[in-house]
Amino acid sequence: MQLTRRTILRTALAAGVGGLLPARSFAASQLALGTATLDTLSDGHLVLPIGFISDNPGAPDLLARHGLSGPEIESPCNVTLYRDGTNTVLFDVGSGPDFMPTAGKLAEAFDVLGVTADEVTHVVFTHAHPDHLWGVLDDFDEPIFANATHLMGRAEYDYWADPNTVSTISGGRETFAAGAIRRLQTLEDRIVTFEDGEEIIPGIGARASYGHTPGHMSFEVRQGNTSALIVGDAIANAHMAFEAPSWASGSDQDAEMGAKTRLDLLGMLADGTMPMVGFHLPEGGVGRVERAGDAFRFIPEA
């Protein structure tokens, strides 16, 4: 398997009278799968309260070992684009302009890569949180990827499309639910749902990874004897999720199920040879999992 690395793609934006603005960077990785490619494109990053990661008493010490302290943490957002010469598949769509000012940069990343929204044949959602779904519509509530089939797991779609979710969801996620149902109602005639284990597109299989959300999905992308696992938010950071995967995560709706899913995926990836792509992992999100005693560590592809 050929692995290549593009550390930074840069574009300088003209600033009129003021000359040039600082170059804007898009951390990206590229993974070759036979004759197909997986690119990760930065949608920017989120700024999250530390407690959103975990309220475990050991969390501050663990995070401090990674140089993280204070009340907030930055979380990169990596959107994955798969191209095999026939299909151009986008896994998640980023935040769009309505979630956080530090995110919603996918259109700029597309420009740098030289890809247009009209070229996307399929949009596949791992789940319906704002940083994965909200970038699907433009300012006029029209689908940005107008030529694409949109796909979401049946359990995930049913949960967020249910009007009762807005009033029953917990953890301050009411805005997540309201934003999701508005977008899913707009996309209703475009969305195709699928079940765990289905091959949703030739060479792309769905794998249930519930817990972060009720119907979260991961995807194995395979061509010939090469493959990669796109895990979305089932493994949501490169520190606590690997070093203490059994700890409850504040970002998971079902913390117990989320921890079990995380442990299962990490064990499988560490014991195999398949690389992974994580939405919130550093260095573009592409890497491998290694065992480290009773825990794990993330090794970005160099």
Image (tube, helix red, strand yellow):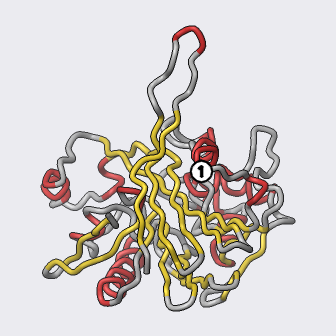
Residue drawn at 87 percent across, 65 percent down: 189
Q: Residue at x 48, y 78 (%)?
A: 229
Count of labels shown? 1
x, y percentage for residue 64?
15, 51
Pick the front one: 200 or 233: 200
Say above or below: 113 vs 233. above
The answer to which image quadrant residue 198 occupies is bottom right
Q: Could you say which quadrant of the image residue 57 lies in?
A: bottom left
Closer to us: 78 or 21 = 21
Badge 1 marks a residue whose secondary structure is helix
Q: Residue at x 40, y 61 (%)?
A: 5
Callout 1, which amino acid?
Leu
- Quarter occupied by the C terminus: bottom left
| Residue 82 percent across, percent down from the top left | 61, 68
Which residue sits furthest top? 17
Residue 55 makes an appearance in the image: yes
Q: Is residue 178 visible?
A: no
Rendered location of residue 63, percent (x, y): 19, 54
The N terminus is located in which quarter? bottom left
Which x, y percent locates residue 169?
56, 60
Question: Residue at horizontal 39%, vertical 71%?
Answer: 255
Question: Against 22, is 182 above or below?
Answer: below
User: Which residue in the protein does label 1 denote?
Assistant: 113
Tell me if mark 1 has few (under 14), some (14-19) or many (20+) residues whose alpha carbon lies within 10 angstroms of its own. Answer: some
